[in-house]
Each structure stands twice: as structure tokens, then as C-alpha cells.
Image (spheres, grey):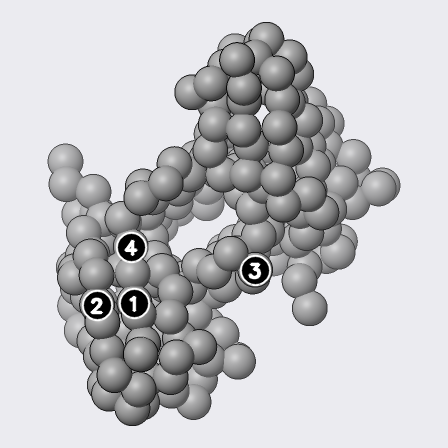
Amino acid sequence: GQQVKQSSPSLTVQEGGISILNCDYENDMFDYFAWYKKYPDNSPTLLISVRSNVDKREDGRLTVFLNKSGKHFSLHITASQPEDTAVYLCAAGAMGTGNYKYVFGAGTRLKVIA
Amino acid sequence: DAGVTQTPRHEVAEKGQTIILKCEPVSGHNDLFWYRQTKIQGLELLSYFRSKSLMEDGGAFKDRFKAEMLNSSFSTLKIQPTEPKDSAVYLCASRRTGSNERLFFGHGTKLSVL
């Protein structure tokens, strides 16, 4: 089964609004969490990541929130813009175990409309 | 610096054929991953190499999928025999060993099996 799940396959947000993308995970050993962005016909690129020793990380308009007890993390994009339209993939890894692979979610397609 | 290079960008195969996808990781990266991307499943891990050693091959893909890393700068993914359900985008990614975070992805190979 899927260890990392993005329950919303798509999301539409008005320009200037807040986009909230969610990700749930199953494995208690995950200690690294990331969001990748993918434009059509382009490869995924890392947006932002956090380790499990923090519950929040901000970078400009992006904020990642980590809820370890709920096995959930989210990406908030403030002041959403049309160029934020893309597919967003969440990923988790269990670096502390020495297994350095990442497990990805299926992705959420964000559309920001003017 | 050259990124991850994948060839070909597009491949069309008849059912039952053998196809070989190629990947050149970022120079100096010792971790290499092969993923399959579909709209439903998202990114599924096919293989993971560290310093040319196979660390993991996705269990569900073992019978017809074989990844090899003949040297530190080149990897292949062979699918034999191909089936229509193999139609997907195949992504290769690399990462510096010791850097447990950022994956650099190639543009992928879009495979269509007729």
C-alpha cells in the first residue's frame, strides 16, 4: 500500500489566496519530509524540506507544517500566483535508519486562477 | 554543471519488445534512483543504487524490470518484455552521498507501449 498519501488529486485557488496542500504518512520511522514541484514536461524540483526535529519551516511564501503525532505534513503557499500552477509531490524518508530512499505521494495538481 | 541526463525522451514500443532506458547522473553523485510516474500511483521506486551497488529494487517490478549501473556515470533500465501497462514516464534521479536530502531529477523518458 501507499506509505505516503495525498488525498486531494487537485486544488483550485484564487490568485492572492492561500494554497494548502496536504500529505499523510504511515511509517513512524520517517524523519525527513519534503515538497517537490513539477511543471508539465519538466522534472520535479525540490521546493522545501524539513527534518522531524522541527514542526515548522518558512521560506518566503512557503511554509511547511509537520504534525508528527498525526503523521501529517502540509505545504502552505501564501499570496498564490498563476505561476504556482503545477503538480506538487510530497515525499518522506527515513534517514535515521540508514535507508536513504524517498517515498513519494501521487501528487496534487494546483491551479491558481486570476 | 550538467544535470541528470535521460535518453531517449520518448520511446514507443510494441508489446513484447525489449527496451532500454539510459541515465547519466550528475557528476559526483553516488546515489541513483529509477522511478516510474503515473497519474494514479504517482512516483513508484523501481531501483536505488549507492556507489553502483543495488540497494533496493521495487519488489513488484522485479520480474520484467532490470536496472544496472555499469559505472558511476551511467545506468540503464531494461524492460523485457514490455506490456501496455508499462506506459508511463520513467524518471531517473541522483543525489550526493552524504547529502540525504535533495534529489536531482532528469526530464524523464515517456514510454508508450502499443
Q: How many marks?
A: 4
Q: Which residue is mark 2?
A: B11
Q: State the CA–CA distance, disc 3 to disc 2.
A: 21 Å
- Same-subunit check for callouts 3 and 4: yes
Write down the quadrant of residue A39 in the picture.
top left
From the image, tell me which residue sits under label 1.
Answer: B111
Badge 3: residue crowd in 10 Å (few <14, some 14–19, many ≥20): few
| SS state under label 1 | strand
Residue A84 on image: x %, y %: 48, 23
Give residue B40's mark.
3
Tell if the residue under mark 1 belongs to the same chain as the one under mark 3.
Answer: yes
Q: Secondary structure at mark 3?
A: loop
Mark 2 or 1 closer to N-term? 2
Dot 2, crowdedness within 10 Å: few (<14), some or many (≥20)?
A: some
Locate residue B106 relative to residue B36 in the image: left or right: left
Lower sequence index among marks 3 and 2: 2
- Position of A36 compared to B40: left or right? left
**Along the horizontal axis of the image, is B23 left or right of A111?**
left
Q: Residues within 10 Å of mark 1 (few under 14, many from 20)?
A: many
Q: Say which chain tag 2 marks.
A: B
Pointer 2 and pointer 1: residues touching (CB < 8 Å)?
yes
Three-letter residue code for mark 1: Leu
Element class at badge 4:
loop
Would you say residue A84 is visible in this rendering? yes
Q: Name the residue at 39% across, 79% down.
A: B84
State the separation of the CA atoms marked 2 and 4. 11 Å
Q: Which mark is residue A94?
A: none
**Earlier residue among tags 3 and 4:** 3
